[in-house]
Amino acid sequence: MIKKIMIAGAALAGVMFGTAGEAKAATYVCGVRYYPAADTYGSEGHVQVSLNTGANCGGSFVGTFNFCTTGATASGCNNSTNFRYERHGILAMWGNLQRAAAADQQVIYSTQGSCNGGGTGCIIWIDFQAT
């Protein structure tokens, strides 16, 4: 039964996020910060997350990525409105990322897609792995 649920969840994720790109290897949240002010990262601010390859900020630094909100024009934001958050969504993402950092929970993410203004490394989704 659990296997069926996992397969159904994976299929749903493919529908929600598309299958154009591959997910990156498992990483860990090393730091997360919410910037609440409206700016080029969106009308509801943005969340910035730093990822490392090892738990407890160990291993190698992977990068710093932004989860943007509606109206974002910054090059660190995906140019698709499908990957922009409203206020309640960005706050939920911030909370989930904080919990993942505190628990040394593995995450898998994807930066596939195009960024505003030709920027690189804009994150489009993150998946919190079971602990």
Image: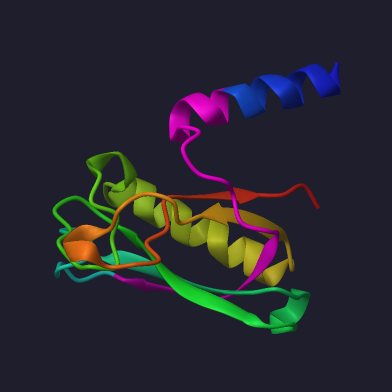
Is 118 in front, or is 34?
118
Quarter of the image for residue 28 reads: bottom right
Q: Where is residue 84 in the image (x, y as percent from the top left)?
A: 28, 48
Question: Residue 25 lies in magenta, yes or no?
Answer: yes
Is 95 in front, or is 61?
61
Q: Where is residue 10 in the image (x, y as percent from the top left)?
A: 65, 28
Give the residues drawn in magenta, as a range: 12-35
Taking 86 as reference, is 106 above or below it? below
- Residue 32 visible: no
Q: Where is residue 91 in the image (x, y as percent from the top left)?
A: 39, 56
Taking 39 as reference, is 92 above or below it? above
- Residue 66 visible: yes
In which quadrant is the N terminus drawn? top right
Taking 129 as reference, is 17 above or below it? above
Q: Where is residue 78 in the image (x, y as percent from the top left)?
A: 29, 54
**Residue at point 28%, 51% (across, down):** 87
Is 17 in front, or is 41?
17
Quarter of the image for residue 105 reads: bottom right
Q: In this view, does 126 lie to the left or right of 84?
A: right
Taking 81 as reference, is 37 above or below it? below
Q: In this view, does 36 lie to the left or right of 21?
A: left
**Residue at point 68%, 71% (across, down):** 102
**Residue at point 51%, 59% (across, down):** 95
Colouring convention used in this rendered image of the protein: rainbow
